[in-house]
Image: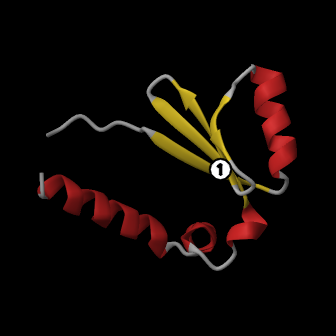
Amino acid sequence: MAEQRLSLVTLGTRDLARSRRFYTDGFGWTPAFENEEIIFYQLGGIILGTFERGRWNGTWAEAASTDPAHSRWRTTSARARRSSL
């Protein structure tokens, strides 16, 4: 079995500007990419993305927080990707 790794984490926030200050001023992280909707930080082998939750209403991001089937979808999708390798 292949080694499993985590490479991308996205976090929804109420206030993207406040979140940016938290990570840049608090941890000293520099955004690798940012626009008015999302900010990505490169942290060694992991990328952290932060986005403002209200901007993505009605997308998979909202469904992930409310639909328990979402975790099953992710697992099934991950298995499908691994089996196709």
Identity of the residue drawn at 58% across and 49% down: 10
Q: How is the image coloured?
A: secondary structure
Please, which residue is most extreme toward the bottom here?
58
Near mark 1 (Cα within 10 A), the count class, few <14, some 14-19 or many ≥20, is few
Q: Position of residue 69 (x, y in %)?
A: 46, 74
Side of 27 relative to 41 (left or right): right
Identity of the residue drawn at 82% across and 23% down: 26
Side of 7 relative to 24 (left or right): left
Identity of the residue drawn at 85% across and 46% down: 17
Q: Nearer the viewer, residue 31 or 5?
A: 31
Q: Quadrant of residue 22?
A: top right
Q: Position of residue 76 (x, y in %)?
A: 29, 66
Position of residue 11 relative to residue 47, above or below, is below
Q: Quadrant of the N terminus?
A: top left
Side of 85 relative to 58 (left or right): left
Q: Position of residue 51 (x, y in %)?
A: 69, 54
Position of residue 57 relative to residue 21, above or below, is below
Q: Position of residue 13 (x, y in %)?
A: 76, 53
Give the residue pinned by disc 1.
11
Q: Nearer the viewer, residue 34 or 78?
A: 34
**Residue at disc 1, secondary structure:** strand
Q: Quadrant of residue 84?
A: bottom left
Q: Quadrant of residue 77?
A: bottom left
Type of the residue with mark 1: Leu
